[in-house]
Image (cartoon, rainbow, N blue to C red):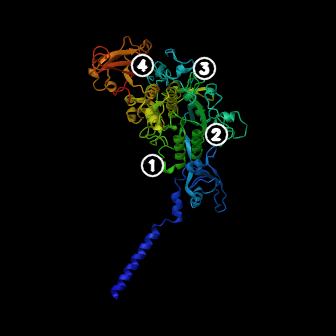
Amino acid sequence: MFMRKALFITLFASLCVACTQDVADTPTIEQEASAMIINSPSGAVAGSLLVKLHNYSDSYAPEATNGLEFSARPLFPAGRATSEELQSEELYRWWIVEFDTEANIEAVAHALAKDSRLEAVEYNIEIEPIFSEPVAMESMPQTSATRAHNLPFNDEWLVDQWHYHNDGSLNYDEYDNSYAEGADINLFEAWKHTAGDRRVIIAVMDGGIKHTHQDLQDNMWVNEAEANGRSGVDDDDNGYVDDIYGYNFLDNSATIDWNEIKMSGHGTHVAGTIAAVNNNGYGVSGIAGGTGKGDGCRIMVCQIFKDGATASEANIAAAMKYAADNGAAISNNSWAYGKGAYISDSAFNRNYSVLMDGIRYFEEKGGIDGVIDGGLVLFAAGNNSYYTPSYPGAYYNHICVTAMGPNFKVGAYSNYGTGANICAPGGQRYADGCGSVHCVLSTSVSDEYEYMHGTSMATPHVSGCAALGLSYAIKLGRSFTLDEYKSLILSSVHDIDCHQTGTMYAQHNIDGWKYIDLSEYVGKLGNGYIDAHLLLMQVEGTPCLYVKADGKEHSLSLDNYFGDGASSLTFSSVAISNEDMTNLGMSSKPTIKSGDISVKCSKRGAGRISVTAIVGGTSVGGGDNMGGMEVTREFMIVARPNIASNGGWL
């Protein structure tokens, strides 16, 4: 009896412990609500929260809490979406809830999170622009008498845009060592193949763009339905009224506001680098600005900043969706969370879901039918001189752009390190209060044209090159997946690390003016600096052979193009045009011996060369004797001032 009683007591005690554990392991309503809040309130917009429904609904009304009234609206207008798209696309489940800005936002978030209709509650975080103030200059233009004026277009100040074609001659007094031949994007060679295509649309997510600017207006994206429609009416049913040139997401208005003081027309400057109108006899040139015959790529205005004010995640996500829905293939971004806010991809991806949903939407729904199957997103690395790039640019699946000056040296302001993918010209000041000529020249809202420097000046160089590549793909009838095209961009580069030697006196945004040890940047500026011409050759599928433009004879192996047995082949011909020989400074045609081609170039440039070999014999068959088959491969001989040890591509 005692034994049975003892056993019963033991079993009862065990059950009590088990029940206690089950109760403890069961999340409370408060715990479940906390888990639904996916980020912290640091930097959140007062009186605003974002909520995501479990399922799409065309109505949502939060219940009043402690006397606090709410208003709610869909974050993304349904526009032309079908019922199937409304049900399947996650973006349509996001709503923005607004309330008294004096209310305790954390208490409100926890109260909303108890609503069983919701999947997530998110603080609407404010995001800062990455912008640069104009660099003071005495007058325009700044052209040096030594600068070569044999230019492809007649734009007045193309001669000063060293970032497109740097021949090393733009030297000014105490800055006579600040320019290096080849520190550019090799644009003049690329322009021989294409200068743009109207079907390529670039969404500039920035401050307002002066779409009436004489050097931009002909290359602006125009919503024809709204331009030719009725004022105050959503003529194209895209959810936005009177959005002729794009939309002002900051003010929720179709009125684009470019009259800025603090941001100094940053968006206008960025737009000019990408696609200012070329060959119109004045101003500057744009990378993808066309030839002056109405053939430039187009700029779509997605205003998310004004006069330095922060943007919200909600506004940026809405801009991403708008751009994709209205035909943009490229999104250029000069904004980021504060430096060091995130140190891992997983933390960023988890905490900021509405923004990631918006970017994902652009990547999936943007692009050009038959050319690229998604939208390309590019980000500036940031101007904090910080050892990691800012998010979202640092995220592994986004292209993050660092900056260099006109001598290949890093822009001292540039963020760098893990997460940085590619480098481009962003300019560099070499003395306090002067040195504007070493910065990037583009369109402006104040003086019409201005110099600026920053990673947000470097990023539109990569966006412009990407637009040129897509233009060339259209011309050739080529098509790519988004991942394929990103790979082409990130491999169309030259070695940047070999130039980061010694010290440089410049303004560091943490430590001020100082001598900077350039070795700190080796391996941290991305895969290399962008080459527009190389990108077009990759789009075309034509391999490039790189040779140093020093007037000396260089031998290059053809094994990679004719196989490892190239040394035993009989090469029957080498063909190159007289024009290309002149372009490369060749006094004689290349020759081939033992599978190596010998080339001597005295000028930087590029030329197409055809090499024919006989495979299967020493003579061509088809006559009275047996013989081999002729095989012809076409290459581009590219002569540059400096060549990496790996043959040009890093």
Disc 2 + disc 4, Cβ < 8 Å? no
Q: Is disc 1 placed on a helix, strand or loop? A: helix
Disc 1 + disc 3, Cβ < 8 Å? no
How far is the residue under mark 2 from the one under mark 4? 46 Å
User: Is 57 drawn above or below residue 164 in the view shown?
Assistant: below
Q: Is disc 2 placed on a helix, strand or loop? A: strand
Structural crowding at the residue carrying mark 4, measured as other residues with C-alpha within 10 Å and reported as few (<14), some (14–19) or many (≥20): some
Q: Which mark is residue 248?
A: 2
Q: Which one is nearer the viewer's eye here, 23 or 231? A: 231
User: Which residue is outermost to the top?
Assistant: 587
Q: Is disc 3 placed on a helix, strand or loop? A: loop
Question: Residue at 52% across / 46% down in the picture?
Answer: 356
Q: Which residue is mark 4?
A: 608
First along the sequence among labels 3 and 4 = 3
First along the sequence among labels 2 and 3 = 2
Would you identify the image quadrant in which residue 113 lies?
Answer: bottom right
User: Which residue is outermost to the bottom?
Assistant: 1
Structural crowding at the residue carrying mark 1, measured as other residues with C-alpha within 10 Å and reported as few (<14), some (14–19) or many (≥20): few
Q: Which residue is mark 1?
A: 346
Q: Is disc 4 placed on a helix, strand or loop? A: strand
How far is the residue under mark 3 from the one under mark 4? 29 Å
How far is the residue under mark 4 from the one under mark 1? 46 Å
Residue 588: x, y in percent?
A: 36, 11
How far is the residue under mark 1 from the one under mark 3? 48 Å
Indicate the amino acid at tag 1.
Answer: Ser
User: Is 368 drawn above or below residue 25 in the view shown?
Assistant: above
First along the sequence among labels 1 and 3 = 3
Disc 2 + disc 1, Cβ < 8 Å? no
Q: Is residue 130 left or right of residue 505?
A: right
Q: Which mark is residue 280?
A: 3
